[in-house]
Amino acid sequence: MENDFIQIAKSAKQASLKVAGLASEIKNEALNKIAQAFEENKQEIFDANKLDLTQARSLVDSGEITQSTYNRLKLDENKMRDMIQGVKDIANLEDPIGKNLFVRKLDDGLTLYKVSCPIGVLGIIFEARPDVISQISSLAIKSSNAVILKGGKESKNTNKKILEIINNALSKVKEFPQNVIQQVFTREDVSEMLKCDEYINLIIPRGGNKLVKYIKDNTNIPVLGHASGICHIYVDESADINLASSVVVDAKTQYPSACNAVETLLIHKSFPKADELLASLQLEEIKLVSNPDRWDIEYGDKILSYKFVDNVEQAIEHINKYGSGHTDCIITKSLENAEKFMNKVDSSGVYMNVSTRFADGYRYGFGAEVGISTNKTHARGPVGLEGLTIYKYKLIGNGHIVADYVSGKKQFHHKDLTL
Amino acid sequence: MENDFIQIAKSAKQASLKVAGLASEIKNEALNKIAQAFEENKQEIFDANKLDLTQARSLVDSGEITQSTYNRLKLDENKMRDMIQGVKDIANLEDPIGKNLFVRKLDDGLTLYKVSCPIGVLGIIFEARPDVISQISSLAIKSSNAVILKGGKESKNTNKKILEIINNALSKVKEFPQNVIQQVFTREDVSEMLKCDEYINLIIPRGGNKLVKYIKDNTNIPVLGHASGICHIYVDESADINLASSVVVDAKTQYPSACNAVETLLIHKSFPKADELLASLQLEEIKLVSNPDRWDIEYGDKILSYKFVDNVEQAIEHINKYGSGHTDCIITKSLENAEKFMNKVDSSGVYMNVSTRFADGYRYGFGAEVGISTNKTHARGPVGLEGLTIYKYKLIGNGHIVADYVSGKKQFHHKDLTL
């Protein structure tokens, strides 16, 4: 007998086929209805969140979860306002579906269209932040994908309530299909999800290193995400000391637990202001570690490993060996060294003279962020709505057959038409 | 102790970092040197191929391999000419690496470049066709990827000789790094390759259904390919009988063993010329099967399953249920039905009034074909050189820090610059 998860996955697949062709107006109406429903029912969400917080408090007391997990779990008026605004913002973005990526005339009367379309069914596995449900559901609706969500058990009541409000709102939108947004709750569901490559097309984990690594190691479904963010700044011989200090301080202290915060500082051995630079970092209460146990460590705190290197090549080698392919920066006045660094460092973001903290979908101008990917296929770096799309080819002709081109009776033209 | 495969994979990773930044001229020189070396040493390749053919002949006689495998294994003057021309053609294509996909001004003096770059290390697993080595090696060089090839054991001598000639040619190109093209030979190597997600970024299987399915089921490395090609043609009520007959005949008989050949014909129950259509197919020696054991069958031969459906919706449902997401076509005079069909059929190719046999990289104008993908991420449909690329973000500034944007001291502009 089929288990419950397969039933959910099948219905998600069915829903994905229906939502794929939905008009932009309907999707945007759905999103605005959700935002309105959050506004009208926010007290219910706060009440559900209080239930979770009460249970979480005793878990903090017994040491089973950290205070920062508790903080992420807690929804307050500010987070609620951001959550509601987030849904409205996504409604206002351009529809990523149905765009002509190219139009090519293959021959007289034979035209090929490359058109963006949804991926299908997304599996989302996330930890304590209940606002992820709202964000991912909105992104899925906008990009015409169906989604199966699995949140952390600490936020179960909040997650249930948010999804109930979302699906109530969606049920009032004529033409909006059922089962586009579904939720599961158990560890067994996660195991089933990871095996379910027949119905699930992409897994997006949102959470810590361990969660992402576990998922990547246990599924053959494509996974979009990053396990760790071990970002580097290399201060070249010619660097400006003030610029270097300011950028490193921002990259380490502006939000130390972010994945795009810097973890390792590499300094050219002949950089004349090295002592001044290190002193300026200590003034900002950054703890400097010159001989860490490991170079591939993500502190997530105001701690910074550092070492001296002989030249830009050695910096590049270090980064390609110990980095996580996330975001790495060179501070230099040498365009030649910057070019070498940016071409040879194999990371999704390669920066010159700016803070690694810019690695973010909003800062890149994507309007929304699905997550940050260190993958080498599909989507890399900060991922916007486009990362939830793929394309199909539409070929329209009038009885064209391949035999005519093989025989030489006809020839292909292959002329791109302007969009 | 590390096994041999890991050593090969590590050296491929190292090579991929070196080949990533290679100038177009060097890559093209390498390709032209390979083409020239094939020309000069083709007798050696034929001799090696004869060794394989002698062994293969007895395997055909004992029934261990089929005659068609033997035919694919055999290199003759025609195949050699095509192989050499293929390398030259790839040299003449535009370089897919280092292209600006967008340039965006984030703020004064802060510019973001999205730039195409190679994926890294490709693992290629292929069956009896030894010309695949030449094709994939050329595509890898052009797209600045390193590659590890595993061919079928039947073509071992031919594969070894071709790779020896390739690597001899590459060794004469100044600046071209070592270990860009490597080969492995055993089943154990395949097992290791499928586990080697630390060093291998993409697996491309080139071969039959079983091979591809085995690979997809046994790795968490992204796989680019298709396990099967169950293509459909739906003949709508308003179809032109001559057009329908001509397109179905082409799609079934022009090359019946191709993955883009049609396998199932769906006919609207009110199509007035159904008998005439079926009779015309039988005249072309197509065997019609009205009640197949399974609807998801790929005959690879002049056999065609068919059934009558009530309407276009039922055709769409059948295709989404039994199809393989490869290429499906509607024959109709109704633009409305065509639009519905092309939007709702979830396949990489959705066609109107043309043969499914057009699903091919050369016919689409890509200049070269990596393979055909039924994936829902990265690359779908016929895949050209672009499918062997990803992108990185280069961000160039002058001491920009995120704190200034969070505090409101500065605002993002997000203005796309024309390329």
Image (spheres, coloured by chain):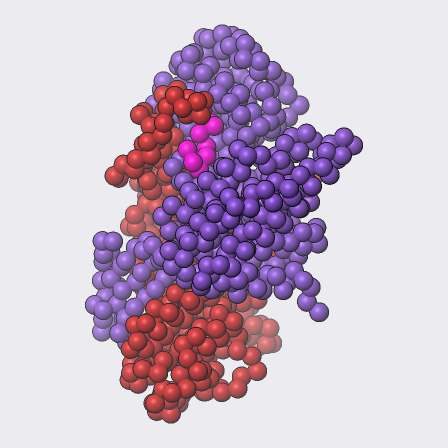
Chain colours: A red, B purple
Q: Does residue B268 lie above or below B99 as drawn?
A: above
Q: Residue at horizontal 50%, vertical 34%?
A: B326
- How many discs mark residues in the rendered view? 0
Position of residue A76 in the picture relative to residue A89 (left or right): right
Q: Does residue B238 lie above or below B386 as drawn?
A: above
In-front residue for pair B185/A168? B185
Q: Quadrant of residue A236?
A: bottom left
Position of residue B48 in the picture relative to residue B19 (left or right): right
In-front residue for pair A219/B362? B362
Q: Residue at horizontal 59%, vertical 36%?
A: B75
Q: Residue at horizontal 25%, vertical 53%?
A: B419
Residue range (magenta):
B353-363
Residue A147 on image: x %, y %: 48, 48
Position of residue A48 in the picture relative to residue B67 (left or right): left
Position of residue B19 in the picture relative to residue B307 (left or right): left
Residue B23 on image: x %, y %: 38, 59
